[in-house]
Image (cartoon, rainbow, N blue to C red):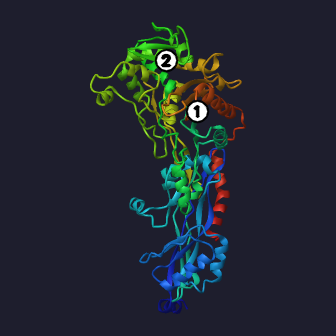
Amino acid sequence: MNVQKYKRLARENYVKPQVVESPRGIIYSRDRKVLAENIPSYTIIIDSNRITEEEYREFSSFLKLHSHPDSVPLQTGSPCHYVINKIPFSIVCDIEEHKEDFPNVSIIARPTRRYPNYEIFSHLLGYTSEISKKELKAHPGYRLGTTIGKSGIEKSYEEFLRGKDGTKYIEVDVRGRELELISYVSPEPGCDIWLNIDAELQIFAYEILPDRGACVAMNPQSGEILLWVSKPGFDPNFFSGGIPSKIWREWREDSLSPLWDRVMKGCFPPASVFKLITAAAGLEKGIVGPHTKQPVQCNGSMMIGRREFKCWETHGSLNLIDAIVYSCDVYFYQLGILLGVERIMSQAKKVGLGEKTGVDIPGELTGLIPSEKWYDKRYGKGRWSKGISANLSVGQGEILTSPLQILYFVSGIANRKVLNTPRIVARAISSDGEEVFSNTPHSRTLPWSAETIEVLRQGMLGVVERIDGTGGLARVPGIKVAGKTGTAQNPGGEHHAWFVAFAPYDNPEICVVVFIENGGMGGSVAAPIAGQILNKFFYKSKERISKSEILNSKQIQMTKIQDICFGF
């Protein structure tokens, strides 16, 4: 009987293979929230080797009658061509009713990426879209039409999130009409990714952050990234199936730059946060001690050559720790001149500024840590003044750093020397519940003595906990918080506000950086936001999930995966 059947197939019909796309792995936060999932959608496929021009014109007219303008010209010569993604179910029903008229047009169900929280996690997660011809060369196992991660976690963990496609073998007649399913090879879903991100904390931070800013936090003892907010964000759901040109143009032309990840690409002068490095350089070189005072007391400014360098306040005579607490510019101008450009900048480079932190998503920028050679090239050898050193000592001038770099460096102070590489992903779990990847921490150490680090910690504690410290608005009841304010001058508008903090002081569980572009003063704008985030972190009901709970949850998710793969 089978012999006769296959003879008939060979004579009259043929077998059409149809790819069944595998669903990407689901992305979860550490507190069990789904951050990226799959939903079913429908796509029209045209068999360009068999369809006639007349049939194609009829089908195009049919779509226009149904008010769906997204059809594109037929590309002949390719095995198949995706014409429309995300077809409304009403159109799917209409096409099915007229399938006899369009035998070379078929509809397939595809798992499509969905991000429930829209823009809140957009820069962190990234987005997916169809693979480009350029990307196809670097991914030989892929095909045109394949969905691939384009940025963020979706891109950097593509090898885990991407599953293995299945195939349907369908008998069709000479007109291309489908007769019956001959065989079916099931797709293999991608691995689920579990992040270190605290979704509840991230959502809270996004809500309280102003319209243009960044906030990033990590556990300094492990390197686990707890939140990663760049605002404004964008809705990554638009990229699934092709982003409308109008939306893309609006994002590109938006003055708030929603596509720009300020956490790792926003490079700005670090302002007074950088005084921690200047102080460390002075301590390590033996130029100052914790109680050293400078010869010129702060009267609100000081003259360097013929230029007046101002301070934000009149502080009088201070020692080093007090200069950190009250963020006295005049104190650090003098220390910067004594150190010189090379000694200050070499310390900055040793703690990771001017280089990538190694965080596990692509696109990080290095910023700029200038050197004497850099200034010689720019101004001519020896043709720049000692005012350059004074300016750099307070984090102004040409130096540029990202919020992520500041977080990384200050986490080493919080951790009393050890710098742990920031890690967003915790682990990957396969569809059968096996842990196939665990993101182990990597570390380096600050190049400073324990005594130097302790002086910096005491100064940072005073910034928040002293009654008149510049970061008092970041206090949290019952928790000792250490921090540092920064206000970066901006020739193009309002100052940029910085604040970095860690807590609890004796055994830090979190280090957080808040940056507000054109926000104003760090102590009055960024510090209270950091305080709210710390308060939320310590006093909310913290859900944490164990590895065994993750593995058990796979049984529930497999049911959802089967619905998407096989339920169309």
Residue 315, percent across and down?
55, 11
Which of these two is toward me, 74 or 503? 74
- Residue 97, quarter of picture: bottom right
| Circle 1 residues within 10 Å: few <14, some 14–19, many ≥20 | many
Identified by mark 1, the residue type is: Gly
Does residue 393 sit above or below 366 in this rendering? Answer: above
87 displayed left or right of 141: right
Label 1 – label 2 distance at C-alpha:
20 Å
Which of these two is toward me, 83 or 533? 83
**Residue positioned 41% across, 12% down in the render:** 286
Identified by mark 2, the residue type is: Lys
User: Furthest residue to the left?
Assistant: 381
- Residue 381, quarter of picture: top left
The reply to whether residue 408 is in sight is yes
- Label placed on residue 310: 2
| Circle 2 residues within 10 Å: few <14, some 14–19, many ≥20 | some
Residue 562, percent across and down?
63, 65
Residue 165, percent across and down?
52, 66
Residue bearing mark 1: 519
- Label placed on residue 5: none
Label located before the other in sequence (1 or 2): 2
- Residue 482, quarter of picture: top right
The reply to whether residue 545 is in sight is no
